[in-house]
Image (cartoon, rainbow, N blue to C red):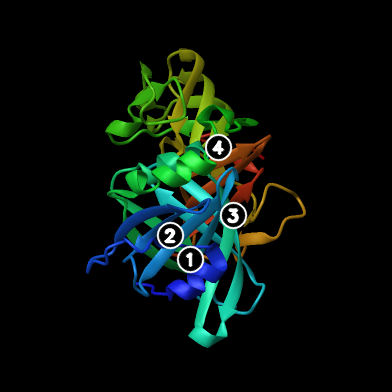
Amino acid sequence: MTHFPCRAAALAAGLMFSAGAMAQDDPGWHGNAYDGMTTLFYGVPQSDHVEIALSCQAGSKAANFVFAFAPIEAVDGVQVQVTLEADDISLPIQTTGTLMQMDDLFLLEGEVAVDARLIDLLGSPGMLSVFVEDGAAEYPLEGALDAAAALIQACGQDAETAAIESCDLNAWIEAEGPAAQVIRDGPSANATAIADMPQPYEGYDGMAYPTASITGSRDGWFRIKEVVTNLYAEADPVTVFSGEGWVPGKALGLYVESPALLDRPADDAAVAVDFSDGGENFLTVDRLYDCRGDWVEIGGTYAGKRVRGWSSDICESQITTCS
């Protein structure tokens, strides 16, 4: 577990704990509002045990995020991406590192919109995973959304204003688990199911998956306009879904033909993952996170490690390359 003094957190995130807050032995989610400042933190009130925190002034549309973690290059001003994940939701936060010398503590601080994605993440079942470089931490989300009520009321954005990123690409549908068995009318597991997810079919050489045409993304979900099956079978292709629907990124797959993943959707972006060494390692894609134009943010494993990054050199063909 990560601990950091409340005084240091107050300097970085404006945390304020009311005098009436009762300390307890077990950490949990707590929220507070005081003099226009609202906070949400995981830890123990009135103690030096605060592991992750958000705070904002009333009327602001972004919360200050603080996480105590020493990255590989733990120097003042270092830029580090922290990614929050829960259920189907992934939320990257760009942070800046600060060394608190008096407390021998390193803090990562950034901003996050108090929008539909954050609200859905806090309301997710199970655990919150916090990924930083090659490190990770997990926190139970029970009680998080209730504790965030003051933060959301003071600084939350209308869920409907969250932008949908537009894109134009194809991927196959490899649905597994109950949550991925339907197409929904919105980017949420709570949205209405409007169609069954097409199932794998017998192709030329074993099982094949239906192909979806993707037009946008939001909060780890992808907007589709069409699903075609039998592309790799002796029977004629069949359009099994047409219209507008949403599927989770973990139900989608494709191949990456570029030798690297980049850290943002641009040709001049820095390399996030390089797999051009020509060795025996292969990138295994197991989910899509986001898309913009012909770029897509991909998650998977490479050389036994979890990786993530952007590519526009992709291929949805299940029987040949696209180059």
Any part of residue 123 in sight: yes
Given the image, on which type of amino acid does mark 4 rest? Thr
The residue indicated by pointer 3 is 111
Mark 4 neighbour density, 10 Å: few (under 14) some (14–19) many (20 or more) = few
Residue marked by disc 1: 67
Nearer the viewer's eye, disc 4 or disc 2?
2
Q: Amino acid at mark 2?
A: Val
Q: CA distance from mark 2 to mark 3?
A: 15 Å
Nearer the observer: mark 1 or 4; the answer is 1
Q: CA distance from mark 4 to mark 2?
A: 37 Å
> Which quadrant would residue 98 be assigned to in this image?
bottom right
Amino acid type, callout 1: Phe
Helix, strand or loop for disc 3: strand
**CA gap, disc 1 to disc 2?**
9 Å
- Does residue 189 sit above or below 34 in this rendering? above
- Of 291 and 110, nearer the camera is 110
**Residue ID for mark 2:** 130
Could you say whether the residue bearing mark 2 is in a helix, strand or loop? Answer: strand
